Image (spheres, rainbow, N blue to C red):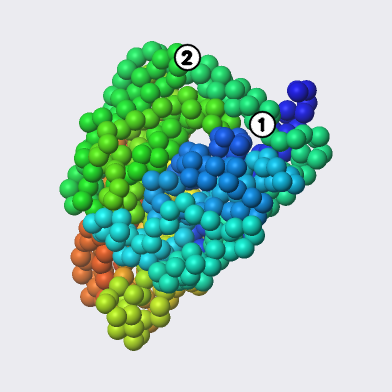
Amino acid sequence: MQELTIQLAWNRLLAMVEEQAQVLMRTAFSTVVREAGDLSAGVFNLRGDMLAQAVTGTPGHVNSMAMAVIKFLQVYPLQTLQPGDVLVTNDPWDGTGHLNDFTVVTPVYQGERCVALFASTSHIADVGGRGFGPDANDVFEEGIRIPISYLFRQGAVNEVLMDLLKANVRDPQVAEGDLYSLTACNEAGAAQLLQMLDDLGLADVEEVGDVIIQRSRQAMLDAAAGLPADAVSYTMTIDGYDQPVVLKARLSVSPTGIEVDFAGTSPASARGINVPLAYTQAYATFGVRCVVGNDIPNNAGSLGVVRVTAPAGSLVNAMPPRAVSARHAVGQMLPDVVLGCLQQLIPQHIPAEGASCIWNPVFMDAGASGPFPGDNDAAQPFVINPIFNGGTGARPGKDGLSTTAFPSGVRTTSTEVNEATAPLVVWTKEFTPGSGGAGQYRGGLGQTIELSHRRQADFVVSKMFDRIQHPARGRDGGEAGAPGRVFLRAPSGEETDLPGKGRDTVPGGYRLVMQTPGGGGMGTPKNRSADALHTDQLNHYVT
């Protein structure tokens, strides 16, 4: 195959998966997808290997979806599928780690012959059960679980599956709409792929895909070869559910790639902070790829060079039927652990620890949390899942980024959208002065959000917050970032602290205040330049 054809096909693949993601955002019903980009999109060869991914999306979705398509094909081999078929699952162990994420896979046909597959994932706000949160005792309490199934069969929707889903969720219109949205974005990618094959005179993407995967794999192996061939370990303690948990990784480099082993990590929890292995692999691999071969395309070739293992039954390789709804509260900490290992090998490239875990509370009316909806007559029914972020760790030669979602990459949902989709008023949303860890390079700042019910009614908050007891640590003499805090403020001004995880009711007239954590600093604070100190004071970044 000519080099020009390969390059043209590669560029077209990148463009079509990005358009696929944009279609998903434009048509999604869930606010967290439409406004925050909590999704993934990609194109796959006939073996289920990911060839290209959209830049829009999260590592947890993209990298776990990259492994999911192979599982779809194990259940429904290509020879059993037909034009018009669309598959779906939200099984945490076959998809992207918890029930709220639905993955849809669409085979693409040129006539009667399958030429590729498209897959996409998005977060659906409610899947029934206890609702999105860390409180369940097992996955059966967390909502409806759909094994790999037909969503459409030869173009006809699976009405039985759709009816079951709608009967088990609090907002059936959103759930149904998001599944059609996922289907539509895959169809958009498929149409562009068929046009590309026609334009370039290709029968399928197999040969082009093999070149892309082989070159990406070799480039990643070359990048890994530049690392010292040492085995290093790093340990981090985080809040956990009701007691601290330990995350430990050992990273080693060999001619065949990079191994990351989470042996020594705490055992699985009795609550829903457990992480299925696919999500652990997704974020641990991302931690490596941030600094090793970060300019190499993300596909099956480059991802395969990083191999991630964890003991079965541990917190980061939880087995069914463990509760996993809030798996991001632990999983999004894993890049910091991996970067802590790499800091010992290539310190000049590694940032300090950051807030890492997004603060994405679920707000709902108080009636929805009780045994009988509507008990609180003043409460308008609603469920929203906004996203707030803390600060990232200071970077080599640069301050950390304030209120930035690293490693997840999801955007904050705007105050206007949150107020338009729920009867809540946001009174305060501002940087928290002094929350970034001091250092020659300062950690990124967290933020303070203060809100209440517009009609002074009770409402419920489900919390999945971390770094309240164990803040982000600095590096090379830098100080830790400020810990997070969540509390109620009574009309009298009295403050009552709440735990970082679990469900609480905010009484009518009270305000809920959330202070997200700051990132750790880097380097001795006395070495910070006078100009940087002056700018910090001028902008009220420090107290």
Q: Nearer the viewer, mark 1 or mark 2?
A: 1
User: Is residue 501 left or right of 335 when viewed as pictured?
Assistant: left
Determine whether 126 is above or below 218 in the image: below
Q: Residue at x 39, y 17 (%)?
A: 253
Front in this rendered view, residue 55 or 401: 55
Q: Position of residue 333 (x, y in %)?
A: 34, 40
Q: Position of residue 296 (x, y in %)?
A: 57, 27
Image mark for residue 225: 2
Q: Secondary structure at mark 1?
A: helix
Q: Amino acid at mark 2?
A: Ala
Q: Residue at x 27, y 50 (%)?
A: 322
Q: Residue at x 27, y 76 (%)?
A: 370
Q: Quadrant of residue 141?
A: bottom left
The earlier-in-sequence mark between 1 and 2 is 1
Q: Quadrant of residue 295?
A: top right
Determine whether 167 is above or below 247 in the image: below
Residue 354 visible (yes or no): no
Residues at discs 1 and 2 in contact (Cβ within 8 Å)? no
The quadrant the N terminus occupies is top right
Determine whether 505 is above or below 321 in the image: below
For label 1, count other residues whose C-alpha is less than 10 Å away and answer few (under 14), some (14-19) or many (20+): some
Front in this rendered view, residue 165 or 317: 165
Q: Residue at x 45, y 34 (%)?
A: 286
Q: Amino acid at mark 1?
A: Glu
User: Is residue 61 left or right of 82 when viewed as pictured?
Assistant: left
User: Is residue 305 left or right of 128 when viewed as pictured?
Assistant: right
Image mark for residue 20: none
Q: Secondary structure at mark 2?
A: helix
Front in this rendered view, residue 102 or 478: 102
User: Is residue 301 left or right of 437 when viewed as pictured?
Assistant: right
Q: Which residue is mark 1?
A: 206
